[in-house]
Amino acid sequence: MLRMSCGQRRLVSGLVCVLVLGLGLSAMAQDEDNPYGTDAGAAKKPSKGKDARPDEAAEKATDDSGTPAGGSEPSKPAEEASKPPREMPAGEGPKADTRSAEMRAYQAAMKDRRLAATAPISRQRLRDELVKIEEKLDNGRRDEAIGQLVYIVEAQRFDAFKETDEGRACIFWLGDSLGRAGAHGPARGYLERLLGGKVDVWFRRAIRSLVDFGLESDHPEVFIKALAPVASKAPEEQQGDIAYLEGRAEERKKRPLRALQALARVTPRSRFWAQATYLSGLIEVERGQLKKGENLFCKVADPKATPKQALLFGGSDFFRVRDLARLALGRVAHEQYRFDDSRYYYYLVPADSDALPEALYESATGRYEAKDYEGARELLDQLRKTGVDHPYEDEAWILDAYVDLAACKFPQADKKLSQFLKRYEPVRDTARALSKDKQAVRKLVEAIESGSDPAAAGVTGDARRIRAVAALLRLDPAYGRSSRRLAQLEHQQSGLRGALGELDDTRQVLAKPGELKAQSARPIGDSPEAKLSRIDQQLEEVRRLVREAKEASKGKASAQLKALEKSLEELEKRARDAHEETREAAPKQDAKTTKDLSGLVVSERERATKLFNEAQKLRQVLLEQQERLAQDALVRLDKRLSRLLRRARLGRIETVLGRKRALELEVEALSQGLLPQQAIDSLDAARFLGDDEEYWPFDGEDWADEYVGGEGLR
């Protein structure tokens, strides 16, 4: 019954790709008022003692916008990032459209063609299919699982089993898989079907998935609205999850009091108790209530104060949030100049934690401010021995030199500061030059996104410096969010391109059902869309060559350059004509055959083409946003490195003054008849011995019979 032929699989696969990609493309678009992402307005910068910076694993607690070496300091070009997100009216966002009517129409059309399954459905067959579907999901074959689930769930014969345990399992896996693929709208439509029935395991799992998708979505309000009717009958742990989602939504809207009220309803039985408590502490600290924030952090950081149920329900993320809470405690203590307390809190971060480098660096900063230079030196040495790359390497370098400077080790401090200037000053100059050249930024972004060598992207400058700037740019949080969105969109576009080819093949098969031919009528990559994509790439390369030729000619126009520009104009015109011909050649929908299978395929082909064109426009918008974010990140990197370079130069001046003062003290001591410590050490013979030598001091007695070497001289 549920086994599909090759043609059925191709048809369903193409339709599902269009369904998922079409309803998922809206999730890729960013708000015009906030191109830095929804979380940028609500993100928190980890300052000394105000809050802690969550990592990827604790992303549900709060989003990261720290101060990495790539330069994430706020600046005027990034003022939009500090704006609160646009408040969306209730109900705006991805619609819960599962397109069931279209799927049922396909089922009916296939039945008319005698292509549909005729064997009856049974619960045992559903169980067997679920085993195969779960195996595909475990192996990462999500698209195939979605296609199979759509074919099952949207069959008319499935209605008799939709309230059974197997039927509800099929609906859940379909909604959950769509949500994991980024299609939050249809996922919500399927999962909401499980909320109106009995309170069983699929009811609870549907709530769990809806909460997860709400936390990922740019519009959590629509998920809160969907969960509101069932919040009262949900189990205690699920009520806490819903309350956490409400708190996160209020916190994004910059409503701290409402957020605190919602987060306070999260009980220890919720898997988000640690995140909710930690986020409440961050909100209290931002409001200036340091004591309240510290008490909330202690509930997570102190094992004795943590409820036992929180450990059972929190999962592995609980311990990562605990590390962040300990960092937050150290920062609060540091803010209040309680350096011993901050040292203790930082010490609680375990050695296997991802936050260990951050804890060691901030602890060393606290010891330096407390004038415990030996303690700061010990912590910096421990940070160096970890051998882990961290976002504070440049800051730690400067701190290391200043610790030597405070300990009057002027030669060592001067050497470290000189090395810092030699390494980072060219990088700063390169970042400054790139930030003023939009064409260079575009080339650099293209190289980073393609994974190629940034030094080979045509950007003028030293190769090592360009690679260093590209590596620092990847660390910028705002740029990273934009890159992830663009990567997701390109992944969906590739699937949509494949769906277009499958729909074309299906239409040809339906037009000539008796014809025997290969599965694909054209070579791989020979579709019109693929050809146009290659033409666009080649045109972009020609534009780059023309641009570089203009730069090399320094404004002097040559006949060869003019001919090349004229050829480029002709190629661009031919490319536009090719795009127009491809759109005109697309099959048109006939109103008379809309209900026929061929007409439905043609209609779906038109919709897929429209979606692909919209995706292309959206991709261009994302590229422009990404270039703007990259330029802002380069400006922040320039300002950050300029600040550190100024500190390095001031440090070198301090080393010169320190050496001068040390010589003055030495001369003053000599005038008083006191030898300097270096002269006293030079009188100790033992200090000149090697590691493989041993010194026996003279004991004051010399016996004549022990003299050896003078025999037979008389």
Image: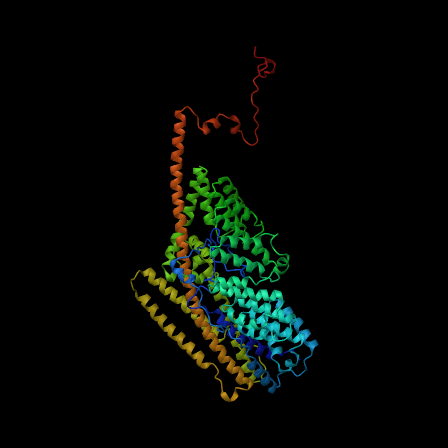
User: Image quadrant for the C terminus?
Assistant: top right
Q: How many marks?
A: 0
Q: Is residue 514 visible?
A: no
Q: Nearer the viewer, residue 501 or 597?
A: 597
Q: Is residue 634 visible?
A: yes
| Residue 578, x across and y down, in percent | 42, 77
Asked if residue 577 lies left or right of residue 382, the reply is left
Q: Give residue 332's position: percent from left, percent from top.
A: 50, 51
Q: How is the image coloured?
A: rainbow
Q: Residue 664: x, y in percent?
A: 38, 31
Q: Nearer the viewer, residue 234 or 481?
A: 234
Residue 384, compared with residue 510, is above or below; it is above
Quick one: quadrant of the N terminus? bottom right
Q: Residue furthest toward the top? A: 714
Q: Nearer the viewer, residue 321 or 640?
A: 321
Q: Residue furthest right?
A: 124
Residue projecting furthest to the left: 556
**Residue 539 horizontal side relative to residue 63, left or right:** left
Q: Position of residue 539 (x, y in %)?
A: 41, 69
